[in-house]
Image (cartoon, coloured by chain):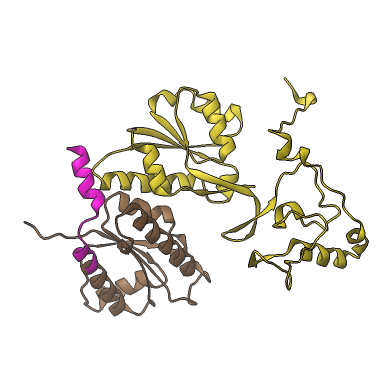
Amino acid sequence: MITAVRKPLEEIMGFAAPYSRVLLLGCNECVTVCYAGGRKEVGILASALSMAFLKEGKKLDIVEQTLERQCDPEYVEEIAQTIDQYDAVFSMACGCGVQTVAGRYKDKPVFPMVNTMFMGASERQGVWAERCAGCGDCVLGRTGGVCPVARCSKRIFNGPCGGSTKGKCEIDPGVDCAWQLIWDRLKALGRTDLYSEIIPAKDWRSAKDGGPRRIVREDLLS
Amino acid sequence: MRAFEPIIVAFACEYCAYTAADMAGSLGMSYPPNVKIIRVPCTGKVDTLHLMRALQKGADGVLVAGCYLGDCHYKNGNLRAQQRVGYVSRLLDEIGIGGERVMMTFMSAGQGNVFAQVANEFTEKIRNLGPNPVKLGAGKAAA
């Protein structure tokens, strides 16, 4: 999932200052799963924001709504009939959702309520960790299911480097060395032969280095 | 001027604090009428949103009263509640209305005296803290 964390209240208060009525818009997808911008978080932020304004003797009308997905135009269309009632939209979706809403309603200011973090997985209740960097050319099949792009601090393809000590990365003793994990997993699978193969330099054009990316599926085009 | 009488909302677990409050009554112990008790099946059922809404709607303080750690009927509901109370406390500090307006407390079903004592102490603490600034601000905003 795409993970996110709520922005500091002070920053959000700054966004809200010029307005008197805003739509606080949640998203039912990734940000719901990581407890950053689902229906419940919309309620909590609405309460917090409302109280922060009232404390200052000001009133901010906050209307709460949560869409199935903010990154799909058909769901964003759902607010077309009501959007004129608001001075601004405060989106609790990831950056994709914020941009889809902003792109559809061009004359309406749209502000992000969360900082979008990374593509990650849940390690345990309340903890998420980066697992995929979206490099566009997956190597997990040869690295024992552990990604060296997302989980190695240096993104090296033939590791580990000299900074690996007792299975931990030199940047932080709390961070596992991805290449130690790769080695351990390949050994458990009986596929250490994969480790012996030198992985050639990666072509990063399929990643962000090739500019903004698109997927076009001609069989699905309308 | 009339003395400030705080409104305290207490989420009380039915396995301990709710029974303890009942026990306090049976034992003839007094606790302030300011404390409005909401019976819950476990403090683990008390969500961050419930605590926030209580304060937003005018409570001056919110108390969450559950079983002693390790004694939860549902294993760890009280631990979860404690974590949520901590989160809300930090959020209230961020809002600027005081994280101490929300408190978690633990007791057993037989401790009517503890319930009465906590209810008295927390009410006194909130009385000293003054009214929820949100209510004062709401008056100004409406003016």
**Chain B shown in which color?**
brown
Does the segment drawn in magenta span residue B27?
no
Query: B119 or A13: nearer the eye?
Result: A13
From this view, report whether residue A220 is shown above or below residue B53: above
**Chain A shown in which color?**
yellow
What's drawn in magenta, residue-wise?
B125-143
Give the quadrant of the C terminus of chain A: top right
Query: A71 or A151: nearer the eye?
Result: A151
From this view, report whether residue B21 is shown above or below residue A35: below
Q: Residue furthest front?
A: A162
Q: Residue furthest left?
A: B1
Q: Position of residue A161 (x, y in %)?
A: 77, 63
Name which quarter of the figure residue B12 lies in.
bottom left
Q: Position of residue B97 (x, y in %)?
A: 29, 55
Q: Is residue A67 left or right of residue B30?
A: right
Does the segment drawn in magenta span residue B135?
yes
Mark count:
0
Give the residue displayed 46% in from the left and 65% down from the top.
Answer: B83
Give the residue displayed 42% in from the left and 73% down from the top.
Answer: B67
Give the residue displayed 74% in from the left and 22% down from the top.
Answer: A221
Q: Is residue A34 visible?
A: yes
Q: Position of residue A209 (x, y in %)?
A: 72, 38
Name which quarter of the figure residue A181 lies in.
bottom right
From this view, report whether residue B19 is shown above or below residue A27: below
Q: Tell me which secondary structure the magenta stretch mostly adopts.
A: helix
Q: Position of residue B20 (x, y in %)?
A: 33, 74
Q: Residue furthest top?
A: A222
Give the residue displayed 47% in from the left and 63% down from the top.
Answer: B44
Name which quarter of the figure residue A216 lies in.
top right
Q: Is residue B42 visible?
A: no
